[in-house]
Image (cartoon, rainbow, N blue to C red):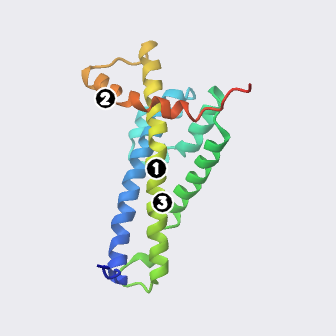
């Protein structure tokens, strides 16, 4: 049987939780990116205190800075860079321009607009899911490098957590630019 399509009020009611879920997913993703940046950055601007600060002025636009830091150490596949560039644009649109007054339950927003926003949010969440393993892999590789140089020490809990991230290392290695043959 065909289920009836949701009403406009039901669509609007779905939009706010979807936005919240996407924001949480994005923040968790950016935590991995920030952790990677901490390990790669030698400029002193990226510290653990800045990373964990509740004040957004202490945190930089981490994904763009991380990509620039990666360029200094390894070549990235151009297709991945394009994908990441599109993701950053969509992330910025979501954070800075999608939260507009027309999402309130009383605002005169059309069904098409709500569907487009829900579609955009779901697409962004799928892209986060696709990109997160890459940065988990980088995080794992950086963690191993820090352990080998005694920059950090690990306890049992951290070691167990790091082992869980090892499965993502190939995801990161897959986005490196292939050597010219």
Q: Label 2 vs label 1: CA separation?
A: 21 Å
Kindly identify the residue that appears in the image at 53 percent across and 28 percent down: 40
Q: Label 1 vs label 3: CA separation?
A: 9 Å
Kindly identify the residue that appears in the image at 56 percent across and 52 percent down: 87
Q: Which is more toward the observer, 61 or 56?
A: 61
Q: Where is residue 135 in the image (x, y as percent from the top left)?
A: 48, 37
Secondary structure type for disc 1: helix
Q: How crowded is mark 3: few (under 14 residues within 10 Å), some or many (20 or more)?
A: some
Residue 173, disc = none
Q: Which is more toward the observer, 5 or 134?
A: 5
Quadrant where the C terminus sits is top right
Residue 128, disc = 1
Q: Which is more toward the observer, 57 or 18?
A: 18
Above or below: residue 142 compared with residue 147: below
Residue 161, disc = 2
Above or below: residue 123 compared with residue 107: above
Q: Position of residue 103 (x, y in %)?
A: 41, 76
Residue position marked by numbered label 3 in the rendering? 123
Which residue is outermost to the left?
Answer: 156
**Residue 178 visible somewhere in the drawing:** yes
């Amino acid at each position: 049987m065909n289920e009836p399509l949701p009403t406009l009020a039901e669509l609007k009611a779905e939009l706010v939780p979807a936005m919240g879920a996407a924001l949480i997913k994005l923040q968790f993703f950016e935590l991995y990116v920030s952790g990677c940046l901490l390990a790669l950055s030698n400029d002193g601007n990226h510290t653990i205190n800045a990373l964990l600060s509740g004040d957004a002025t202490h945190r930089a636009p981490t994904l763009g800075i991380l990509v620039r830091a990666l360029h200094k150490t390894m070549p990235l596949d151009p297709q991945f860079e394009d994908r990441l560039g599109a993701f950053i644009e969509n992330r910025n649109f979501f954070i800075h321009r999608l939260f507009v007054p027309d999402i309130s339950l009383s605002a005169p927003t059309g069904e098409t607009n709500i569907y487009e926003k829900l579609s955009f949010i779901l697409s962004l969440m799928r892209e986060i899911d696709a990109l997160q393993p890459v940065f988990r892999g980088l995080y794992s590789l950086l963690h191993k490098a820090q352990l080998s140089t005694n920059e950090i020490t690990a306890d049992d809990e951290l070691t167990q957590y790091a082992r869980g991230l090892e499965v993502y290392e190939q995801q990161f290695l897959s986005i490196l630019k292939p050597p010219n043959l």
